[in-house]
Amino acid sequence: MQQKKIPMRKCVGCNESKSKKELVRIVRSPEGDISLDTTGKKSGRGAYICPSADCLKKAVKSKRIDRILEVTVPAQVYEEAERLLTEQ
């Protein structure tokens, strides 16, 4: 029996490749709304980040998420992401 291919994505904070299920996705919808996508199935342009506060801080400081999503991400999205990561 063949093994299923595991989709890999790179964290924008630490630049490590991990499986898609291990990472949290921040997505910009076609309408321009930015939100967290815990399911990984929302349509739009996405940036993946490890579920750790350190990776989020690195990504925010270097503005990597802004560059990947091609928009300025509002502070409330970062606050929501930090709250989600500290709950886990």
Image (cartoon, helix red, strand yellow):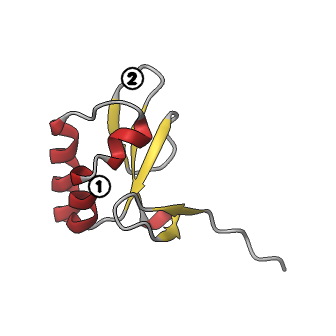
Q: In the drawing, what numbered circle is on residue 59?
A: 1
Tell me: residue 67, above or below residue 25: above
Residue that lies at the very extreme toward the bottom in this rendered image: 1
Tell me: residue 76, above or below residue 51: above
Residue 36 location, quadrant: top left
Specify whether residue 77 is in view: yes
Q: In the drawing, what numbered circle is on residue 32?
A: 2
Closer to the eye: label 1 or 2: 1
Q: Nearer the viewer, residue 18 or 71?
A: 71
SS under mark 1: helix
Q: Residue at x 50, y 70 (%)?
A: 18
Image location (x, y in percent) of residue 10: 49, 62
Q: Nearer the viewer, residue 40 or 50?
A: 50
Specify whether residue 88 is in view: no
Q: Residues within 10 Å of mark 1 (few under 14, many from 20)?
A: some
Image location (x, y in percent) of residue 74: 21, 33
Residue that lies at the very extreme toward the front in this rendered image: 62
Q: Amino acid at mark 1?
A: Ala
- Cα separation between marks 1 and 2: 20 Å
